[in-house]
Amino acid sequence: MKTRIDSRTWAEIDLSALLHNLKYAKRCVNDRPIMCVVKADAYGHGAVPCGLFLEKNGADAFAVACLEEAIAMREGGIKLPILILGYTAAEYADILAEYNLTQTLLDLSHAREMSAAAKGYNVRVQAHIKLDTGMGRAGILAQGKQYMHDAIIDACRECELPNLDIKGMYTHMSVADTPSQIDYTNWQIENYNTVCEGLIANGHDIECCHMSNSAGIINHPQAHFDIVREGIMLYGMYPDSRPVKNGPLRPVMTLKSRVSQIRHFPKGTTISYGRTYRAEEDITAAVITAGYADGYPRRMSNNARFAIRGKSYEQIGRVCMDMMMADVTGSDVSRGDEVILFGQNGMSVEEVAQIVGTINYELTCRVTNRARRMYLNDR
């Protein structure tokens, strides 16, 4: 027996909004190639369905976090280049070659391990060199003049290793969404350019240089280089997680649920665990079939607004694992009505993030598989 996808709680994925955001990025970068970042199951939106749609509508490449995500993309039918941004152990060199994947080399020792494994398997592995120009995370240390000589030497040595095809080199911006730290971003760009120039001087011309994430696409045209990596803005969310009214991006995910019951409570009744809400007068409450097991934050207890029949209603009491309540006193809300938890025509994911004290895309990543995805406007 199959239930309807929208029978309880579901996430609507508007593919027309996804395409709109891709085209907006294309305009920002003067039609440079776009690498669409679909890690973490496309930030909770569904990597394979979104990837297939993007592949036929103008994407140039994809990026994922790990080997398992890349294999899922290939087995789902994706044919465009896929860059693995995170670590893959050298023992999987044959798998990288079999699936025609491009692996990030985190440092010279990682590159040497991958080269030796590829030689042992008698395969060639496509790879991108990773530089740490200021993120303080993965990559060859290339932060400032004191490290430049060694960074260039290490990058050159990676280029010269057997059984590796070095297709690109990249770095990641740490504060590209923070205008007050533009000097630091410019320093990162300078560090990156210095290594690029050093490679060229040593006879290594990298064909695909990239640096810009979503914030870089929007704010730093001097860092667009050969290709850009469109991540969070692809899904209609802003890199700084601040709410934007009538902005250029369109939200892709709308999380929805249903009203399961209408309850009438007398003045003084307390609602849900911990009795954190007490009715100041007689109220009518709607029980909604969603909770934190669907990915709706428990931190939103007594802080949220839900859209039902085009009107806004306050959430009351603690959010439970599978249910939560809203005050619908004086309304015509009834069992089966659709409820917008966040997204189009409801609270924006940025508004929810501000209350929870997190970033917008952590929230979409949190939406669990129990809230099934419904893909709209495919073409």
Image: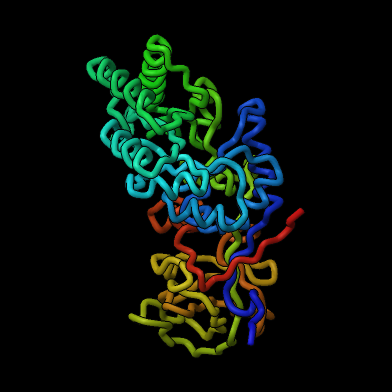
Quarter holding residue 374: bottom right
Specify how the rendered protein is coloured. Answer: rainbow
Q: Quadrant of residue 118 in the image?
A: top left
Residue 267 in the image: above or below residue 111: below
Q: For the N terminus, which image quadrant? A: bottom right
Q: Residue at x 59, y 78 (%)?
A: 8
Identified at 64% across, 75% down, the residue is 5
Residue at screen point 26% across, 15% down: 149
Up-down: is 52 above or below 102?
A: below
Tally the marks.
0
Q: Is residue 27 above or below residue 250?
A: above
Rendering coords of residue 173 (x, y %): 41, 32
Image x and y of residue 132, in percent = 33, 30
Q: Which of 346/227 is in front? A: 227
The image shows residue 165 at horizontal and vertical percentages of: 45, 31
Residue 351 percent location from the top left of the image: 50, 54
Q: Is residue 233 left or right of residue 24?
A: left
**Res. 85 image quadrant:** top left
